[in-house]
Amino acid sequence: MNPHAKLILITSLILGTTITISSNHWMLAWMGLEINTMAIIPLICKPHHPRATEAAIKYFLTQSTASALILFSSMTNAWSSGQWDITQLNHPTSSLLLTMAISIKLGLVPFHFWFPEVLQGSSLTTALLLSTLMKLPPITLLLLTSQSLNPTSLALLAILSALIGGWMGLNQTQTRKILAFSSISHLGWMVIIILYNPKLTILTFALYTMMTTTVFLSLNRTKILKLSTMLISWTKTPTLNTTLMLTLLSLAGLPPLTGFMPKWLILQELTKQEMIPAATIISLLSLLGLFFYLRLAYHSAITLPPNSSNHMKLWLTNKTPNTPTAILTALSTFLLPLSPLIIPML
């Protein structure tokens, strides 16, 4: 892609995200979401492959539906209350439509079908943008309107997302699809706590973004797209594979790694809110995700494949230093001791 075109698209993505997260008016927020959608589509179909084109069309159709629902919801609310302020969402129909629209934007269950397919058709760097930066505007809208939304429906969406995200990821062999279902599962954890402690949702999203960025950068460096390739990538970058294993275990939420912190704090907050059944269910559902993270970690750390592979062996490559990945890996694995400093801020 032309560097100038890429610069314009990345700038548009940042601009669209900034407009949405800083606006109080529904039309401005909607405009920011549209700028984001228009900017990411050329990046999705950049590889000039039928699967990439299919992913771009699927993304465009789902995001257009969600944007139309957001516009309809805000207009219905403005018609009944005379308010275009995002925080003044009082009409019950508008609340229901907005919950559906944001669920489609984020890829929450049962509106998740587009997300793994779009990630599978995108390059690793575009998949990283779709999993992190593109989630920020809808999460912000959900934070601003959460007090007007139905708590039961949000809890149901969250538990279903944790269930389907863990369950559907069990049988996958493509790394991008596994990370897509991981994203759906993590979104369930963010949504279940958003009504009771919005700051905890922000912390969970920030840590998830950091860990996912580390995983995607590591996979992009070794060009791993499937588990069978990961089995024989040890000879190429042994140190990177070891740190990738630690980051994956952190993403699973195992102590004493960084990923344990948000899960621990969310379960603690749910218990304080006397939502013990929800806390029990979502903690049990995290075991489903733990299985496929352990599977990925095992594949990344194994030195000899247990069976013959059709892939060409990957030998040592150019060892140029990769400082961003190194810094992100350190943060993704060793932040748990700082939790006494973070907890008072919540």
Image (spheres, rainbow, N blue to C red):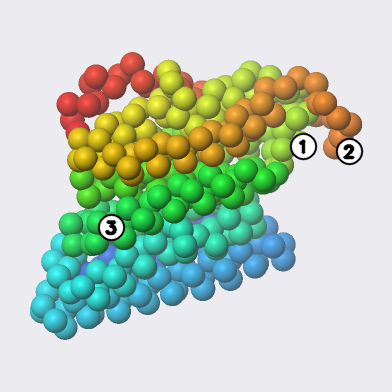
The local crowd at label 3, few if under 14, some if 14 to 19, many if 20 or more residues have their Cα within 10 Å, is few
Q: Nearer the viewer, mark 3 or mark 1?
A: 3
Residue bearing the label numbered 2: 310
Image coords of residue 259 (percent x, y): 42, 29
Closest to the observer: 5 or 82? 82
Decide if residue 56 is on the left or right side of residue 28.
right
At x 39%, y 61%, the residue is 103
Extreme residue toward the front, this view: 277
Amino acid type for the residue under numbered disc 2 = Asn
Q: Earlier in the sequence, mark 3 or mark 1?
A: 3
Q: Residue at x 43, y 18 (%)?
A: 256
Give the foreground label among 3 and 2. Answer: 3
Tell me if 112 is positioned left or right of 13 in this view.
Answer: right
Q: Is residue 288 visible?
A: yes
Circle 2 residues within 10 Å: few <14, some 14–19, many ≥20: few
Q: CA distance from mark 2 to mark 1?
A: 9 Å
> Could you tell me the amino acid type at mark 3?
Thr
Q: Is residue 87 left or right of residue 62?
A: left
Q: Which residue is mark 1?
A: 228
Q: Are marks 2 and 1 in contact (CB under 8 Å)?
A: yes
SS state under label 2: loop
Rendered image quadrant of residue 142: bottom left
Quarter of the picture containing the N terminus is bottom right
User: Residue placed at 20% from the left, 35% from the top?
Assistant: 272
Q: Position of residue 185 (x, y in %)?
A: 47, 46
Q: Which residue is mark 3?
A: 152
- Please give the label number shown on residue 185: none
Q: Position of residue 147 (x, y in %)?
A: 18, 57
Say what amino acid the circle numbered 1 marks: Ser
CA separation in Å, label 3 and label 1: 42 Å
Is residue 63 positioned above or below 3 on the image? below
